[in-house]
Image: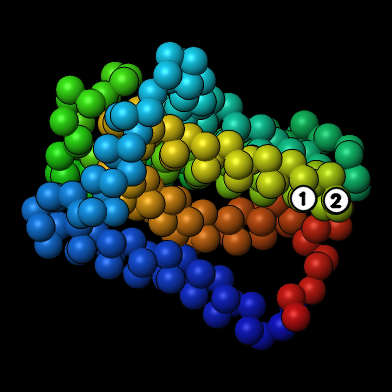
Amino acid sequence: MTARAPWRRVLLPAAFAAAFAVLAWVVLARHGTPYAVDTGPHRWSVEHRPHGMVTVARTVTDLGTGPFPYLAAVLGGWLAGGGGVGRGALRTSRGVPMALLALAVLLAGQAVRTLLVMALHRARPPAADWATHASGYSFPSGHTASSAMAAGLLAWGLLRWRPGRTGRLLTALCALVALAVGCTRVYLGVHWPTDVFGGWLFAGCWLGAALPPLTTFAGRSGPGGPGPSDQIETP
């Protein structure tokens, strides 16, 4: 690991945080009034809603709420702890603490996001355009941020468990699911596109700050020291 690595750990979440702050300022500059980039996709979504697509969108959007994000975070932590030593060998003694830490990361992220939503209090699109239930304020999107944080934690665990091609493919699948959840929030009419983008930026900031210390802890805890994925040298 080179000396530049600590700076990279700071710069990534800082970049996401700065982008989120700029977007929040832009959104609040008009007191939450949507821009053309919001109203265009929203109007298209409202006008293109066959019953089958709405059913699919509701199914996908549910992955961003309820038990699903928490189960994904727990599984990611368990794989990261249990799979950190040797390829494919799950060690419960290390997996359980990491699963709890990953869950704590997600819960803390949810708490911070909730505070931001309440502080920014942006109104949702008109309720007449909703194709699913929604409550609370709009920015940043809760389903979007939750699914992205959970997908990131699961992808992190999968890459530690299977650091090769399989892990990368599963990581791409996690990213696609998080992307789909965010898009359904616009399609179902309960969020503006900038709400969804804000959710992704918040998740990127939170994961960028949380994953490096989690990775360090996963590599040092328990017997055996760092696993294969911890030995990758940063150029």
176 or 4, nearer to the observer: 176
Quadrant in the rendering for residue 212: bottom right
Answer above or below: position of 56 versus 73.
above
Dots 1 and 2: beta carbons under 8 Å? yes
Image height of 226 relative to 32, above or below: below
Viewer can see residue 79:
yes
Compared across the picture, whether 38 is left or right of 61 comes to left
Residue at 70% x, 46% y: name it.
171
User: Going 66% across and 32% down the picture, which residue do you hit?
Assistant: 75
Residue 165, which numbered label? 2
Give the secondary structure at mark 1: helix
Under circle 2, the secondary element is helix
Judge the density around disc 2: few (<14), some (14-19), many (≥20) Cα neighbours within 10 Å.
few
Residue at (14%, 57%) from the top-left corner?
A: 28
Relative side of 71 to 110, left or right: right
Give whichever of 99, 124 is nearer the camera.
Answer: 124
Estimate the x, y position of residue 153 in percent, counting from the top left: 60, 44
In this picture, is 111 found above or below 221?
Answer: above
Residue type marked 2: Arg
Q: Amino acid at mark 1?
A: Arg
In percent of width and height, residue 186 lies at 35, 37
Q: In the rendered image, which quarter contains the C terminus?
A: bottom right
Query: Relative to the observer, which residue lies in front, 162 or 51?
Result: 51
In the image, farthest residue toward the bottom: 3
Q: Which residue position is annotated with label 1? A: 168
Give coordinates of residue 61: x percent, y percent.
Answer: 45, 27
Q: Residue at x 81, y 67 (%)?
A: 232
Q: Are there few (<14), some (14-19), or many (20+) residues within 10 Å of tag 1?
A: some
